[in-house]
């Protein structure tokens, strides 16, 4: 199978680099990005070709940076795009959709997309050990996908993560290291370790390849909308990579003639307790002022986001906006999506739903605009966030009379 990757290229100065585990330009310290031969892709890729392929993210393989077939995560992606009529009615959007990566295979978050690319590259580059710095979902995904191909893995997480995230990593018998500190401390440590050990760190030396996996989230939205780009998309932000890659996906599809046009306004969502990117957008700054995270939305609690600068650009240049919500609204967001659409999302999803509500209230998203909410992770992993807010079940003995006398009215009254 042909690869359409020309090589890596510095996003700032444009210097070319070979296809290698590198992430930073040695001249200007700009980030490296995968560079494709789009003219060649265009001769190969059409809607009909894509539609004939299996329903997973590799149906867009010409636009993903693996050489040959992917060797990790062949079943990842093509999650449902759900028409969210009830939530749309509640929020005041006539045509609302939820892109539901809370059911992404195998670890129930969009991180399986980035990890399948990163670990396929790790095998191509002959690494026998991989690692990551993670706020939880990436930890789950690296551990699971590494286990599936016999790669050794070292996973670094803040020590205070939710039990579901920790247990959902330990089960794969990987090497988990809890660091006393926040994600930014973990990431700093991992950069030092990656400099010293010859390991494939998915979000450090493999980052340019890893990040490209997120484009599949955007490709799927466009294909599932019957080959059109939505008017608005709302995306949760941590490091700020996913939001930039959704934009890249739509831009590439337009360039390749797979969608008629692309006027999507891209909106970023954060928790107020960790909102370095939305604060910059609101203040009209093009640079990040790092913060110390203090929020229940731990999966997106990154105080010094690596792609913050490009995330700001994405929102500004597409005519979008950045908003944030306090933790109480995060919980409300989780509950609204569950009650209206039967989808249990994690805290990041609660942030995105609540921010969407705020954007409609502000008049930034209009009732007749086709809007997609990016739901990127599963609620079973962050049960701590909601357990205090739900009433325990009424307990009775197994008798009809007990149900009728005690439970029926009490439960129905809730
Ligand atoms: C559930 C979830 N959503 C969104 C994100 C944000 O991704 P990014 O770091 O690319 O902004 C993360 C990152 O960890 C996440 O775990
Ligand atoms: Zn450069």
Image (cartoon, rainbow, N blue to C red):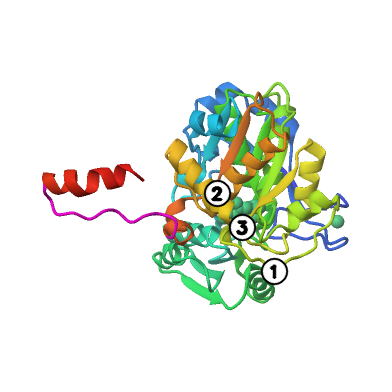
Magenta residues, dominant SS class: loop
Q: How far is disc 2 from disc 1 in space, using C-alphas?
A: 21 Å
Asked whether mark 3 lies closer than 8 Å to ligand 1, one says yes
**Residue lying at 56% horizontally and 25% vertically, measured from the top left:** 49
**SS at mark 3 in the image:** helix
**Residue lying at 14% horizontally and 54% vertically, measured from the top left:** 397
Q: Which residues are magenta?
A: 388-399
Sequence-wise, the earlier of marks 2 and 1 is 1
Q: How far is disc 3 from disc 2 in space, using C-alphas?
A: 11 Å
Crowd class of label 2 (few under 14; some 14 to 19; many from 20; radius 10 Å):
many
**Residue lying at 48% horizontally and 35% vertically, measured from the top left:** 80
Sequence-wise, the earlier of marks 1 and 3 is 1
Of residue 83 and residue 340, the one placed in the foreground of this image is 340
**Residue lying at 64% horizontally and 45% vertically, measured from the top left:** 355
Residue to which mark 3 is pinned? 300
363 over 295 or under it: above or below: above
- Check whether the beta carbons of the residues at disc 1 and disc 3 lie within 8 A of each other: no
Of residue 157 and residue 147, the one placed in the foreground of this image is 157
Residue to which mark 2 is pinned? 350
303 over 68 or under it: above or below: below
Residue to which mark 1 is pinned? 292
**SS at mark 2 in the image:** helix
Residue 267, horizontal then vertical, whole percent? 70, 41
Crowd class of label 1 (few under 14; some 14 to 19; many from 20; radius 10 Å):
some
């Amino acid at each position: 199978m042909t690869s359409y990757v020309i090589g890596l290229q510095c996003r700032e100065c444009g210097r070319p680099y070979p296809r290698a585990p590198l992430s930073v330009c040695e001249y200007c310290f700009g980030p490296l990005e995968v560079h494709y031969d789009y003219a060649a892709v265009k001769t190969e890729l059409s809607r009909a070709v894509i539609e004939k392929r299996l329903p997973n993210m590799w149906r867009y393989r010409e636009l993903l940076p693996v050489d040959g077939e992917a060797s990790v995560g062949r079943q990842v992606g093509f999650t449902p795009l759900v028409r969210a009529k009830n939530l749309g009615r509640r929020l005041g959007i006539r045509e609302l959709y939820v892109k539901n990566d809370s059911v992404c295979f195998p670890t129930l978050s969009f991180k399986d997309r980035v990890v399948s690319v990163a670990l396929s590259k790790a095998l191509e580059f002959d690494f026998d050990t991989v690692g990551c710095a993670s706020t939880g979902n990436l930890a789950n995904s690296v551990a699971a996908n590494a286990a599936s191909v016999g790669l050794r893995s070292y996973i670094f997480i803040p020590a205070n993560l939710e039990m579901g995230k920790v247990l959902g990593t330990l089960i794969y018998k990987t090497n988990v290291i809890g660091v006393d500190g926040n994600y930014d401390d973990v990431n700093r440590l991992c950069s030092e370790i990656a400099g010293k050990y010859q390991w494939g760190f998915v979000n450090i030396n493999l980052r340019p390849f890893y990040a490209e996996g997120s484009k599949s989230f955007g490709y799927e939205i466009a294909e599932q909308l019957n080959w059109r780009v939505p008017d608005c998309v709302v995306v949760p932000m941590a490091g700020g990579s996913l939001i930039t890659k959704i934009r890249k996906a739509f831009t590439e599809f337009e360039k390749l003639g797979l969608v008629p046009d692309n006027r999507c306004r891209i909106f970023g969502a954060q928790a107020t307790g960790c909102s370095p990117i939305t604060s910059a957008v609101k203040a009209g700054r093009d640079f990040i002022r790092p913060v110390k995270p203090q929020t229940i939305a731990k999966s997106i609690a990154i105080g010094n986001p690596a792609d913050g600068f490009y995330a700001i650009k994405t929102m500004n240049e597409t005519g979008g906006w950045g908003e944030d919500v306090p933790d109480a609204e995060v919980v409300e967001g989780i509950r609204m999506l569950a009650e209206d659409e039967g989808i249990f999302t994690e805290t990041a999803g609660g942030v995105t739903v609540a921010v969407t509500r705020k954007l409609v209230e502000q008049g930034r998203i209009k009732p007749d605009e086709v809007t997609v909410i990016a739901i990127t992770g599963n609620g079973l992993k962050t049960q701590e966030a909601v357990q205090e807010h739900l009433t325990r079940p009424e307990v009775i003995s197994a008798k009809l009379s007990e149900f009728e006398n005690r439970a029926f009215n009490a439960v129905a009254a809730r």
